Every structure is written in structure tokens, then in C-alpha cells.
Image (cartoon, helix red, strand yellow):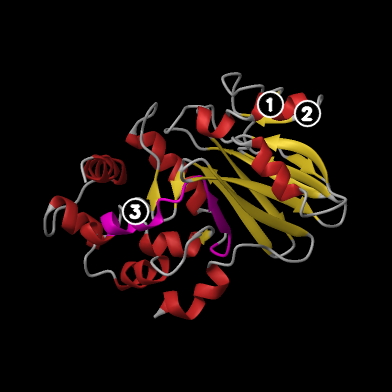
Amino acid sequence: MLFTHVSKRLFSTSLSRKMIIKPVPCLKDNYAYLLLDQKTHQAAVVDPVEPEKVLSALSQYPGYKLSAILTTHHHWDHAGGNAALLEKFPGLPCYGGSSNVEAANHIVKNEDPVKVGDLKVVPLETYCHTMDHICYYVQDNDQRAVFTGDCIFSSGCGRFFEGTPADMWKSISTIAKLPDNTQVYFGHEYTISNLRFAQHVEPENREIQEKMAWANRTACTTPSTIQNEKLTNPFFRVESDSVQDNVLGQGKRASAEEVLGKVRQMKDNF
């Protein structure tokens, strides 16, 4: 009964004390995010595809100054608002993983932190969906969060548009090494459809069943946690006996990368 026991803690939509994270729904099913440092009143925005919605959300926090754009990857539905936002805030640092990111003026390096007020934001190379994909990890005392864009979704992962199963397994492994209580702020509201597939892969997984019941009652399912992804995300779980039995056949075994490729193909055709 782990899911029901910890659901309120795992799935709250903001963090207290110095660090505040505010989801901003955009387009059909995207999420941008505000990252606010209460100590310095500095703010960053993650993937501001609709700048007017982001600025409207920021206006709910009087006195905060927008100080950075954090872009997870170059796809238009994540980076497509950068230039318009920079027109309103000339000189604003716009971080991204490559020059392919619209209006990026600072190319980040793996694990080379950037600052948002007193918050240290650590870029993590998480290639595959695109080969410039960056997740951003931030810690404030015992509070931890990671913005995963289109690399990791709640109980799912992004399509392998530019990389290989080996690339995605490396990226998943990078995220899975974060502390279990790290909150996972993902780029799209795909949770229910992802859970339908997860149930298909592991029909006996009780944690998936409980999460589906919760998601059906919840309009906004961000954030998840690393702990919950390890329990409910078939792409995280490709080394488990349950996933390997159901994907390969009872008792058959293969590498994580091989099973991941098969699970991704299954999901693409689901």
C-alpha cells in the first residue's frame, strides 16, 4: 500500500521554505514551470512555450524578478517561447543544451551548475529524445526537484527521436540515481495514458493500479518522485523480473538496453 500511504507527500504540487515550484499548463498538455527562490526573490522559468501564461503566473508572486530561462531541449513546444520572452526581458540568461535551442545564449555543461538566487541548479545531460536534452536538478536543504522535460514523464519516457535505447538507458540511470524523495517535474500531462501502458506491461503491479486510481481523481499529476517512478515506470523497471518475463517470455532475460528498446517499441504501437 506504499502509494496510498505516501501519495500526499509524493504528489504535492509545490515546495515550501525557500524554494517554490509552480506548474504552468501550456498548449494542449505541456507544462512550463516557475522556480522561485523565496530568500532572494529571484525566479527562473522552465520551458516557457507560452510566455504570457508564464508571466501571468509570475505576477501572482509580487516582488519576484525573472532572472533565467531553463530550456530542456530544442523542440518548439518547449523552446518556442524563448525569443518572445527575451524581447520582453533583454539580456536575460537563456540556458540550453545546444545552439539548436531557440534564443539560447548560455550553453550548459553537464553538472556545471547555474544559479537562481541562492539556488544551485545542476544541468544533467539526458540524451535520446534529443541529443541536446538537459534535465535540471535543484536542491534546497532536504527539498529536491528535477525538471525532466521530455526525457522522463510520470510512469513513462520520451520517444527516441534522436538517440538509441542505450542513450535512453544512460539518461534514465542518471535520473534514477537521484535521491528517492526527489520530486520529478515532467514536460507533459501523459500520466493516465502512460499508466494504461504500464498496466499492460505489468498487470499484477499493485503500485501501478493504485497510481492509476489516484491519477483518475487528479487533474494535474505533476510532480512524481524518483521513488514512485522506480515502482510504476516500466522504462525504469526494465531490469525487473516482472517486466522481463512479460516482455521477453517467462524466464527469459536480456540486457536493460535491449528490453528498453522493446518496451519503447511496444509503447509506440500501443
Neighbourhood count class around disc 1 (C-alpha, 10 Å): few under 14, some 14–19, many 20 upward:
some
Foreground tag (2 vs 3): 2
Please tell me whether residue 234 is drawn above or below residue 46 in the rendered image.
Answer: below
Q: Which residue is mark 3?
A: 194
Q: Amino acid at mark 3?
A: Asn
Q: Which residue is mark 1?
A: 84
In this picture, residue 51 sits left or right of residue 153: right
Give residue 176's mark. none
Q: Quadrant of residue 12?
A: bottom right
Give the percent coordinates (x, y) of residue 173: 45, 47
Mark closer to the chain start, 2 or 3: 2
Residue 178 makes an appearance in the image: no
Q: Amino acid at mark 2?
A: Lys
Looking at the rendered structure, the secondary structure element under dot 2 is helix
The mark tally for this picture is: 3
Q: Residue at x 33, y 67 (%)?
A: 208
Give the percent coordinates (x, y) of residue 183: 57, 59
In this picture, residue 62 sits left or right of residue 212: right
Foreground tag (3 vs 1): 1
**Mark 1 vs mark 2, CA separation in Å:** 7 Å
Looking at the rendered structure, the secondary structure element under dot 3 is helix
Q: Is residue 187 magenta?
A: yes
Mark closer to the chain start, 3 or 1: 1
**Mark 3 vs mark 1, CA separation in Å:** 32 Å
Give residue 88's mark. 2
Please tell me whether residue 18 is drawn above or below residue 118 in the rendered image.
Answer: below
Please tell me whether residue 242 is drawn above or below residue 252 in the rendered image.
Answer: below
Range of the magenta residues? 180-198
